[in-house]
Amino acid sequence: MEKIKNYIEENKQRFLDELFDLIRIPSISSLEANKPDMYRAAEYWKKAILEAGADKAEIFETEGNPVTYGEKIIDPALPTVLVYGHMDVMPVDPLELWDSPPFEPEIRDGKIYARGADDDKGQAYMHAKAFELMVKTDTLPCNVKFMIEGEEEIGSPNLGKWCEQNKEMLKADIILVSDTGMIAPDIPSITTGLRGLTYVEVKVTGPNKDLHSGIFGGAVANPINVLSEMIGKLTDEDGKITIPGFYDKVEVLSTEERTEMAKAPFSLSEYEKALDLTEVSGEKGYSTNERTGIRPALDVNGIWGGYIGEGAKTVLPSIAQAKISMRLVPHQDNEEIAELIKDYLTKIAPTSVKVEVEFLHGGQGYVSPTNMTAYLAADKAYSESFGKKPIPVRSGGSIPIISTFEKVLGIKSILMGFGLESDAIHSPNENYPLFNFYKGIETIPLFYKHYAEMMKK
């Protein structure tokens, strides 16, 4: 441990400077204009992996954005850890809500503020530096491979195919991921479950052009009014999703399992205070942690139509649109759910409008066993680094590609996240505490140490 801490202390400013250079690349995967930045980020990762001590690193083309792959094989007989991370980030809108430019990282109150500071540049880069630390101090106990993709934020549409094409190259014993969170700065946790995702876009069309709301109002269906009513029918007064068949495959946890989950530290009053809420909301009969961990959810992520500019424009719009995401629990099939919501919205729409539902992307949920070697090694690593045992938690978030890894590569993943709920990922003023960044670099080599030792037995 002393060797690890000393190396971090001697190089901490350089680590930070390198991360800042990566963050400055606006690698937004959902915007075609930022495509060149995806290649800049891929090149940066290639350079970082090689300089950290990899034997080789290469950028691979996909039908979308590139993948950076690197490896160091010290002995084919030893275990192999495949590190997964992503170089792409979410859009920064609304820009006016940022307190500092999103791609100019700034440290305030012990936190790095920038898009990608946590998700996932800060967390992924910890692995490059932890790898460097082990190589430079001659403490690397097993083989390491890196797979850094550029499409996670848009559902990894091309990574599954790329993995299928490169199965031999990607052979490993475990996939190591830091793209999740922990309960609190002093309460480490290991994510043992992720929700799946179905993401759709709904388009409601009324008249063939925008109309004068005085002349036509009351005589022609308003697509915004109709879409709003349709969205209102997707959940009931108890917060339950009303789409027929939606809950057919939802696993109902036992009282014993729910009791065990409830042991995780959580303050509802602090949760509400942090979000400036007077009351939480969700499915009746479940706690806040259960609503985000073991139950599915449906949310409108964006809705638009008509005139939203300054001042007034009395228009009855031709089209209204919305983006809707559904977080799914294990056993729910994301494509099946997409068909269910499409059928339901089409059924409840009045004949005065036309409805189109497009499935944009999604993925299956994932559960990581707490009795596998990698989990036990991660438990030891956190215990040694933080001085207390980590708590297993199920995350409300989704990383759709994780279930694909198991399906295509036949490899389980261990989710060692160091982010916090307060990091504002996907939002303006995303941030990542310096403590967590350095603590991650400290904890990761301990995982390798314990994992390699346990795999020998």
Image: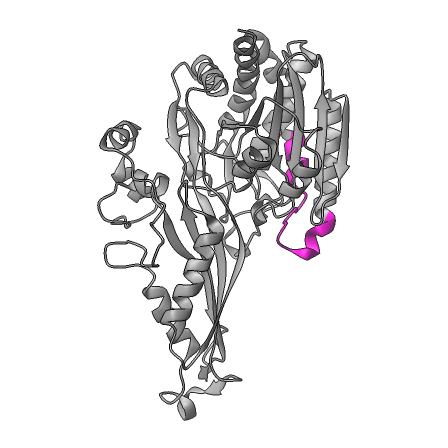
Location of residue 79 with respect to 324 vertically, above or below: above
Q: Position of residue 196 (x, y in %)?
A: 45, 44
Quadrant in which the N terminus appears:
top right
Q: What stretch of residues is rendered in magenta?
A: 17-36
In this orientation, does residue 62 appear? Answer: yes
Q: Position of residue 112 (x, y in %)?
A: 54, 36
In the image, 71: left or right of 354?
right
Give whichever of 457, 260 is nearer the camera.
Answer: 457
Q: Position of residue 99 (x, y in %)?
A: 52, 48
Residue at figure coordinates x 42%, y 52% from the top left: 326
In this orientation, does residue 13 appear? Answer: no
Residue at figure coordinates x 46%, y 43% from the top left: 424
To which quarter of the image does residue 54 belong? Answer: top right
In the image, 277: left or right of 222?
left
Location of residue 353 with respect to 44 vertically, above or below: below
Give whichever of 96, 84 is nearer the camera.
Answer: 84
Magenta segment: does it hold 387?
no
To which quarter of the image does residue 243 belong? Answer: bottom left
Give whichever of 417, 93 is nearer the camera.
Answer: 417
Q: Position of residue 127 (x, y in %)?
A: 61, 25
Q: Tell me the colour scheme of the image.
A: one colour
The rendered magenta stretch, by its main secondary structure, is classed as: helix
